[in-house]
Amino acid sequence: MEQVLILAISFVIILLGAELFTNGIEWFGRKLELAEGAVGSVLAAVGTALPETMIPIIAIGFASSASAHAIGVGAILGAPFMLATLAMFVTGVAVLIQARHRPAGDVMPVDTRVLRMDMGTFAVAYGVAIGAALLPAEPTWPKLLAAAALLLIYALYVKRHFEADPDVDAEDLAPLRFRRLDPVHRRAPGPPRLRVVNLQVLAALGLIIIGAIAFVGSVEQIAHAIGVDEVLLALVIAPIATELPEKFNSIIWVRQGKDTLAMGNITGAMVFQASIPTVVALVLAPAAWVAGPGTYLAFASAGMAFLSSAVIFIPMARSGRLRGRNLLIGGLFYVVYLTVVVVAILRPA
């Protein structure tokens, strides 16, 4: 009962942090004159992805056991899978709930150029990452080359987003929540000072991280109490606990009609998770990043992530529009894979 209470409190903390973060990161992007794609796909995506990225870094970088490395690899693979499936589904549900209040119904007013770039980069980066897993464990230098390629891909991706023209006006933004904490400009006209914006963003990230740590700890305690398998925890439960709560940013932006930010928060996180955490595995534990007997189930999640992404975004690329109902397909892929995992775990050896 205690863990359930902690779970509920951490959930509220994450929601509060998400509300402050979405408001603050929009003003941060406005102050730096960044495009909406850079704000959603880079700043918001990376900012909210950092807490869960610590799981594989700690498991792989600061532990030497094979089981710890397996948990790290499972967490790395689980994040893109969860984002491409369950996070898409949750966002689609949010869009459908808001559809009656939208002029175009469930048609999302997204910048399809931003999403095409995000998903194209994800396909290339994750393709390189999974391709590296098909290489033999020795020698390790090809995997180090793959790690270097992933860093280059992500650097070019960030560069392209930051070079885009800004398209968000101050009039489109809600007042900064921390503006009243500024003794000089709290009642003055014009945008808030950057230092106050930075304070709100950092405070929001702090709340999200604190809430996420408590949330993950409670989920793990509850999972162990009911006897959930360690593999299932690494592949499915840990990514839900670390990624999904922070994607409430996307739900908030959907409610505000800022769908490019909402989707970019997810697709940008997919690019980040396919690139940076994978580099950690390739550099620090190349022997663990191998698709073979014992890891086929984990790496099968990558196939589901690719399939779900293709089914959702290829029609968008062809038609030039994205519907909320199309995001619901991610939930189907999630259920299919979860069923496969549970059957494999429960099957007698």
Image (tube, grey):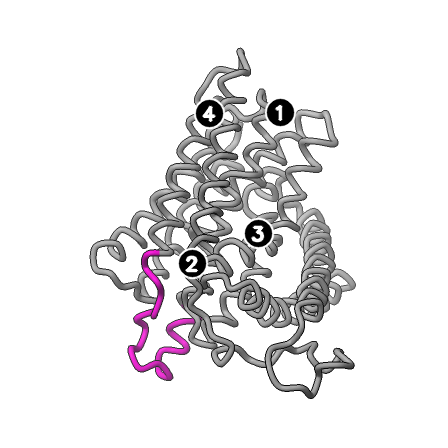
Q: In the picture provided, is 268 more to the left or to the right than 46?
A: left
Q: Do tag 3 and tag 1 residues touch (Cβ < 8 Å)?
A: no
Residue 126 magenta: no
Image coordinates for residue 259, horizontal then vertical, percent: 41, 68
Label of residue 285 in the image: 1
Q: In the picture provided, is 195 more to the left or to the right than 337?
A: right
Under mark 1, the amino acid is: Ala
Label of residue 132 in the image: 4
Mark 4 or mark 3, which is nearer the start of the sequence? 3
Nearest-to-viewer mark from 2 and 4: 4
Residue at screen point 54% across, 22% down: 144
Under mark 4, the amino acid is: Ala
Q: Do tag 2 and tag 4 residues touch (Cβ < 8 Å)?
A: no
Mark 4 or mark 2, which is nearer the start of the sequence? 2
Determine the CA span between mark 1 and mark 2. Answer: 30 Å
Residue 94 magenta: yes
Determine the CA span between mark 3 and mark 4. Answer: 23 Å
Quarter of image, res 304: top left
Under mark 3, the amino acid is: Val
Mark 3 or mark 2, which is nearer the start of the sequence? 3
User: Which span of residues is magenta-colored?
Assistant: 93-113
Give the SS element for disc 4: helix
Q: Quadrant of the N terminus?
A: bottom right
Determine the CA span between mark 3 and mark 1. Answer: 23 Å
Q: Nearer the viewer, residue 235 or 177?
A: 177
Mark 1 or mark 4, which is nearer the start of the sequence? 4
